[in-house]
Image (cartoon, rainbow, N blue to C red):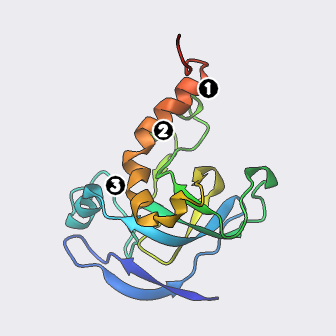
């Protein structure tokens, strides 16, 4: 198995350590992402300083980072061909990983998942690494033009997901359109 560099937490209020760790093996419904850029959000800082130790404890050592963009490097065995991902495609990662089954998720509010939702970088290993595994339904393709600036895309995965979810819900409800 190949190795990669990753920044890992060993404790709260401690500096991250850059280490060699195995490249994650994507699960059947996951893509392997070659990370191009990961933002450093205030909540990442709060995780490192122990602010979230009670509500979001992580198993140490841990790889944080929830604002991620990168290129598809591999596909799990059950990733549907209908998602249309190919190796090399640039995607951004929706950081809020709802379980997809609870009422909130079914209504398009995965960020409020009342089931077994997770937040990448606060549960599943995050993007402070060369590679990460992502459920295919949480990867959003971007154009090659946008892919030229992954360092600008990464922070938008957090700040940009709020209006994205709102626009998607309006579209799905047939409420999005031009008025004359």
Whole-angstrom CA distance, mark 1 to mark 2, is 12 Å
Q: Is residue 134 above or below residue 12?
A: above
Which x, y percent locates residue 96?
Answer: 47, 48
Query: Could you say whether the residue bearing mark 1 is in a helix, strand or loop?
Result: helix
Quadrant hosting residue 57: bottom left
Mark 2 residue element: helix
Residue 172: assigned label: 1
Is residue 46 visible to the viewer in this orientation of the structure?
A: yes
- Circle 2 sits on which residue? 164
Left or right for 169, reference 112: right
- In the picture, measured across the screen, residue 174 lies left or right of residue 67, that is right
The one nearer the camera, 153 or 3, is: 153
- Give the label on residue 56, or none: 3
* Residue situated furthest front in the rendering: 180
Number of marks present in the image shown: 3
| 99 relative position to 124: left or right | right
Q: Identify the residue shown where x is 58% and y is 51%.
A: 138
Closer-to-camera residue (76/91): 91
> Which residue is at a point 37% across and 56% down the rendered structure image?
155
Please tell me which of labels 3 and 2 falls first in the chain: 3
């Amino acid at each position: 198995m190949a190795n990669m560099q990753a920044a890992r937490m060993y404790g709260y209020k401690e500096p991250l350590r850059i280490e060699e760790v195995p490249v994650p093996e994507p699960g059947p419904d996951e893509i392997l992402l070659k990370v191009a850029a990961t933002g450093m959000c205030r909540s990442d800082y709060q995780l490192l300083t122990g602010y979230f130790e009670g509500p979001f404890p992580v198993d140490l050592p841990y790889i944080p980072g929830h604002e991620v963009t990168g290129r598809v490097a591999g596909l799990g065995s059950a990733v549907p061909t209908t998602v249309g991902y190919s190796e090399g495609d640039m995607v951004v990662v929706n950081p809020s990983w709802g379980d997809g089954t609870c009422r909130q998720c079914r209504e398009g509010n995965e960020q409020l998942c009342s089931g077994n939702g997770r937040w990448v970088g606060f549960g599943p290993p995050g993007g402070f690494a060369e590679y990460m595994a992502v459920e295919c339904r949480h990867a959003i393709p971007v154009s090659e033009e946008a892919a030229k600036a992954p360092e600008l895309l990464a922070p938008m995965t957090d700040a940009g997901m709020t209006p994205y979810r709102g626009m998607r819900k309006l579209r799905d409800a047939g409420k999005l359109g031009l008025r004359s």
